[in-house]
Image (cartoon, rainbow, N blue to C red):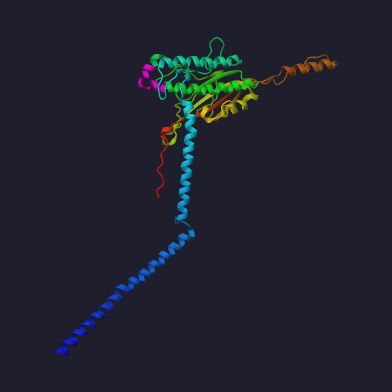
Amino acid sequence: MDKLKQNAFWAGVLIAGAALVIAFGALVVPLWAKKAGLQNKVKGVWNNLKKEKTFPSDGDIETHKKQRGEIIKAYAEFGIFYGQSSEHLQRWFPDLKLAVNAVPNRGNFMASYRLEKDKVEQALKAGGVKIGIGEETVKFGFNWEDPEPAQFVAVGADDTKVLKEIQKRFWARERVAKAIQTILAEGGKVNRVHDFRFFRKLHPQMTGPWDAFPSAQDAVNYMAVGVTQAYMAPQNFQEYELPQKLGRTITFGFALELPYSQVPRVISEILNPAAEKGVANRLLVNVIGSHVSIREQNQPSEPVVYTVGDEAARTAAIQKVKDAIKPIEVILTVTCQIIDFEPSELKKFEPAQE
């Protein structure tokens, strides 16, 4: 009996062992095979990644860190460059003697403004440049914005914004006036400031003589401002807003009467004024369009009167006609933009994560 019990125990052990072997073969061995297959698959993907170099290695990470640093540095330099020019654009008249971030009294500002704009025109007139069109009743010219006190009252809380806009527009006009003065000092010639205007309204609730647009024989053609027809004013002009609230453009145009030979010099002086080298001391002006109009032309032929056979008289008569033919003055219109930059909106970058 004891032997039977002992044999039954060992038989059970053998049966259980056999069951474990069967279960191991049925459950574990397939998982081993599956594991080997997955390992081979992962190895294949890894090899492909290494071949295609799409997997970021330590070297790739270091390269990206370096590139990030270079981009941030370039962004900061961009901010400094435009920020310095913006400070030049944002400044008030020096004679107001304002503290940093202070706002001038409207009366004091407008008094300085009228005085300074008169100085600009007088300096050009002293050089023989005419301002505006007409003799007794002069119109256009620099088209200075000079709102009435009631108009400032009407805009309410926006009156300081209007003053700041008038100040910026003064600096733009002064930039063109200085360009003309430089050309005159070099022996060049500009006959007349025919027109000057900003294409965005000073304020939606403000209007004045400065909004009138030259027409008929006084018409000018400003390029690149979206006019529907040549020699017409643009309708509902909108300035371009810089991304990330970094500012906007200020678009203006001017028209000068001058010899055609002076056209390249004017554009060159507007883009790169000889008297203003450093970016911190000048406005950043882009020329986005220009146009030359010829209002008159020389006669296609002129009679030459002389006695037949008198060759000296014939030669003298021809020379007299040639001497009378002069280059015709042209109207040059130039459309410009200033970047009104807002340094306070520059993005602050966090240090790179290690």
Magenta segment, prevailing SS (helix, strand or loop): helix
**From this viewpoint, is residue 204 visible?**
no
Residue 75: image x %, image y %?
Answer: 47, 39
Q: Nearer the viewer, residue 118 or 281?
A: 281
Q: Which residues are magenta?
A: 152-162
Question: Does 155 appear in magenta?
Answer: yes
Residue 287 lies, with reference to residue 14, above or below; the image says above
| Residue lying at 48% horizontally and 47% vertically, measured from the top left | 67
Q: Nearer the viewer, residue 40 or 240?
A: 40
Residue 119: image x %, image y %?
Answer: 53, 15
Q: Is residue 296 left or right of residue 27?
A: right
Residue 330: image x %, image y %?
Answer: 62, 22
Residue 17 lies, with reference to residue 197, above or below; the image says below
Question: Furthest-right residue in view?
Answer: 309
Residue 304: image x %, image y %?
Answer: 77, 16
Q: Is residue 313 left or right of residue 190?
A: right
Q: How many marks?
A: 0
Residue 76 lies, with reference to residue 250, above or below; the image says below
Query: Which quadrant of the view contains residue 303?
Result: top right
Q: Is residue 125 left or right of residue 39?
A: right
Query: Which quadrant of the view contains residue 28?
Result: bottom left
| Residue lying at 41% horizontally and 34% vertically, measured from the top left | 345
Question: Does 250 appear in magenta?
Answer: no
| Residue lying at 47% horizontally and 32% vertically, measured from the top left | 83
**From this viewpoint, is residue 53 visible?**
yes
Q: Nearer the viewer, residue 127 or 277?
A: 277
Question: Furthest-left residue in view?
Answer: 1
On-image quarter of the N terminus? bottom left
